[in-house]
Amino acid sequence: MPLCTFELPAVFRPGHYTACYLLAVATYQLLLLLEGRRRGFPQRPWLLMQAATLLAFVVGCKLVVLPLADWPVLWGGGAAALGAYPVRSALGGIAASSLVLLALRRWLGLGWAAFDAFVGPLAVGLAVQCLGCLAAGCCWGELAGNGGLGIRFGPGTGPYAAQVARGLLPAGAAHALPVVPTQLYALLVCLALAAATWATRRRPWPAGTRYLLGTGALLLAWGGLCQWRDPASQTLGAQLLALGSVRLLAIQWGVLAAGLLHLAGAALLRWWGTVFSVARAAAPGTPQPIRQLAGAAALLALTAALAPHALTGAEFRVLQVALGALLLAEAAAWWPALAAAGWSGQPRLAFAATLGLLVLMSQAPAPRQDSVRSIDFAVGALQGAYDQDFDYPATTTGGGCGGGGSYPVPPARSAYLHRYQAVGAEATLRLRRTGTAAIGLGVWGGTDRVGYAPQIPGGGPLQTNFVPYTRDYSLFDINPYVEGGRRIRGNVSFGVHLGFHAGNLLNSRSLKGDSVLQGTHFLPDVQLWVGNRQKFFVQADAGRGAGGLGNYLYRVGLGSGLGTSNGSTVVAGLAFADPSSGAYYTSDKYGTERAVGSTLGFAAANIRLRGGSFSLEPTAATNFGRRHQVSLRLHYRIGLKK
């Protein structure tokens, strides 16, 4: 019998493995960030290195346990095999992240001391992860013998199932037989390694020595713990191999050999230390902004390719945080450069919004087909132009306090030439599988550049050559909305979109006849449609989405899904800028506005890409003259579980 036996406390449950995994990665990444700052590494390359090695660690943990016979599946059918395979090993993660660190170290301008920075944080992260192994009952030990420690696991855990399968335990037993607590021993080893790394942090050892010492010690300890592991709990190299009279598991031979090589390398560096730079003296490399951007883009693309099939929910969440920190640092670094290059606030806002969308679409798995709810994120841009023509008829005015008589005021005519642009983002929570019930919020901002062009009174054409004054007006729009729909009969349905625009929406009211315009601060956002979205429907809207900013449009059109069932649609029809004489009511008692190109043709589409996760929404309205409005939005949808 074991000298001391204890049962797993009630706080530990198999479902807590994910929480421990998230906590372990968060601890690892935070300590790694702090260690990089302590060593004086440049922040942006270090964040890129952190994100790249984290992705390599996640994928390496799975790839190393995938049978070699299944590797061709990765090339023939994508990365789906990684997501389907249930086991993993941290050895593969350490190896993969080390290879990525070796490949990117020089390219990002980091010295060999970058290897040393990983040892302490990795040890602490693995220690936290050992709690997850304890909670899930994985990586368990063999049956506890006399004079040692033993731990009992309950039903639903690996040791319980293995003992029932071997006939050592009757089905329905309250708990399994005591096994060696290898998870606790591994936790103590990792904490001891972290403590040793911290205690020797001020030693002026050659760069790379701490990495070789730490990983060598970890590998040797790993090989030793395998001696007490239950063969059923081994996820890698569980076959027995004999060299002479010594019989060990294949994984033991491998990690023991690798550990000894690492320790020999550390001894060689220590002996030949005068040839290598000292870790604490590592100087930051020259910034390489192009390499930095290229690395971030490649990492985003790779994560986006792996996310739908090869990453679990916990894995893509930790990658979301890592890439979010990286992209925030990139946005902060490039923001002053964009301003110095003459970019105004709107392009910079678009740049930041695009980075945010890239984070979302690079980590989130593809929407589940059985999802009842989903979140749609979108970023977009809007550009347009139109002219206004105001007439001020002849009138008279009083003589004033001097008692003089009235005098005539001659007729006048003024033109306002608008060129506006805006960028923004939207988030929509869709509450039904069909997407016909939703609530959302859009935020848009931009600039309306208005040229003031005095005109010759009369009915002649508008003259746009002479523009003595130009004024920039800010545009800002907060656009909450709700959507709903109902089936009428058969395949015929109707839908409604209701909301409002609030902010500085339009600058189109001329009160004094000079170069200053007054703004409009509240407008409705309405859309109605009826028909079959896959085949044919009729649609009418006013100020829909970004159409409520800069130039308010009313639209009526016919649409079709062209027989598709993925939500793609095209719509075409007529748009009206001022369907009645009061469309741009100015409240100016002196003047009236003439209609200038107020009828436009428009076309819009919603094009689903990549199995429905991505979609593009282009719109265009024009009178084939000086009035037009074009916009483009990129959507990404994330499916939510019930």
Image (cartoon, rainbow, N blue to C red):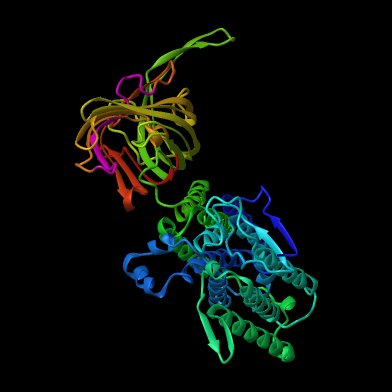
Q: Considering depth in this image, is 238 or 355 the residue closer to the camera?
A: 238
Q: Position of residue 186 (x, y in %)?
A: 67, 67
**Does the stretch in magenta take in 582?**
yes
From the viewer's side, name the closer residue of 542 and 84.
84
**Left or right of 172 on screen, residue 361:** left
Q: Position of residue 363 (x, y in %)?
A: 48, 55
| Vertical relation: 573 (above or below) 119 | above
Main SS class of the magenta portion in the image: loop
Is residue 529 visible from the viewing direction of this image?
A: no
Quarter of the image for residue 637 reads top left
Residue at (38, 72) in percent of width and height: 71
Residue 93 percent across, percent down from the top left? 55, 69
Q: Quadrant of the N terminus?
A: bottom right
Residue 55 seen from this side: yes
Q: Is residue 79 left or right of residue 625?
A: right
* Residue 513 magenta-highlighted: no
Q: Is residue 158 above or below residue 234?
A: above
On the image, which quarter does residue 575 sit in? Answer: top left
Position in image of residue 30 (x %, y %): 66, 59
Q: How many numbered discs?
A: 0
Front in this rendered view, residue 250 or 129? 250
Q: Magenta span covers which residues?
A: 565-584
Q: Quadrant of the C terminus?
A: top left
